[in-house]
Image (tube, rainbow, N blue to C red):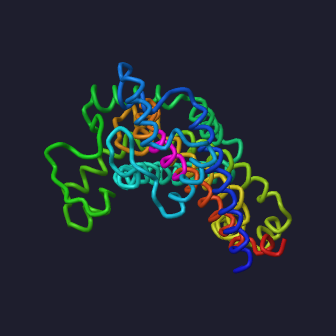
Amino acid sequence: MLRFILNRLVSLVLTVLGISVLVFLMIHITPGDPAEMMLGERASEQALKEMRERLGLDQPIYVQYGRFLSRLVHGDLGRALRTNEKVTKEIAERFPATVELSVMAMIFAISIGMTAGIISATRQYSIFDYLSMFFSLVGVSMPIFWLGLVLIILFSLQLGWLPLSGRLSYDIHLETITNFYIIDSILTKNWVALKDALWHLLLPAFTLSTIPMAIIARITRSSMLEVLRQDYIRTARAKGLSLWVIYYKHALRNALIPIVTVIGLQFGILLGGAILTETIFAWPGIGLWLLNAVYARDFNAVQGGTMLIATTFVTINMLVDVLYAWINPRIRVS
């Protein structure tokens, strides 16, 4: 098992190195001049030249990449051109909001999606099966930005049940320790802030969860149906085992590998793809921050944020591989 994990770690490092090359090149071939963005269109050529020299943009691209890689190894992502703050500091302030949103969305997706998929598989061709698969198809097809706006109009503007935007109400004070509002509320025993933070999470998290929820439901159903047709399941039925033991002890564990794959991939996608949801709900996460950085041609922020998301995605995939090996030891041997 240790050798298996070490092989995955080596692959992770090589993948991240390749991603760093792609991210750096894509940022630097994108049209736009960061110096002009900072100084304005009316800046003189001399001022622009001095700014490019200060930012190191006058150096050959391989020299710039070498400096970028050197800083990256030491955990230094440079300073954001818009605010002159360290990129690592801005990420530390924003990324917890995205993680909270993504985790809550995955809780919705896994709990509802797997439950619907299991019931659909165990009650194939029932009315619940047809309804579950219908809503799964709707969930995959429905644009997030449209669903978010509809939910805001219905639950925030019309009914007034849920907050419109943000992570916390303006009149709620919370002492931030980790920038994870849920954790900080528990650590400081601020139960009012905890309730308010969870209340603000519900609408954007449910909106973000619809696509992975639908995918998990369909994958769970198909994987469970495939396992339930195996000979050992028929043998378990013939031995008189209870349906609970057959479905959850024998069938579900053997059906988990494709389900775990989808959950891992979808969680990584949520961490990097929550831009639309964060924009609609004014959620101060990494997605909204990256979008503003792209508009401002802030290449240090874009590089740092993209590398963070890519590294997180690759790390999650590695953890999924390790989880595979734990669920099915045959993978370690192969």
- The residue that appears at 57% across and 53% down in the rendered structure is 115
Judge whether residue 44 is colored magenta.
no
Of residues 120 and 264, the one nearer the viewer is 264
Quarter location, residue 281: top left
Q: Quadrant of the N terminus?
A: bottom right
Vertical comparison of 114 with 254: above or below: above
Question: Does the magenta stretch mainly form a helix, a strand or a loop?
Answer: helix
Magenta part of the chain:
299-308
Return the x and y of residue 160 as percentages of the image width and height: 24, 32
Residue furthest to the left in view is 171
222 or 286: which is nearer to us?
Answer: 286
Which residue: 74% across, 72% down? 240
Q: Identify which residue is drawn at 29% across, 47% down.
A: 199
Residue farthest bottom in this picture: 2
Q: Residue at the front extreme?
A: 46
Nearer to the camera, 108 or 316: 316
Percent of width and height locating residue 137: 63, 34
Q: Quadrant of the C terminus?
A: bottom right
Where is residue 48? Give x, y as percent: 41, 30
Residue closest to the eye, 183 or 7: 7
The relative height of residue 282 versus residue 118 in the rendered view (above or below) is above
Q: Please give left or right for residue 75 compared with residue 163 in the image.
A: right
For residue 41, which quarter of the picture?
top left
- Where in the figure is residue 192, as x and y percent of width and height? 18, 55
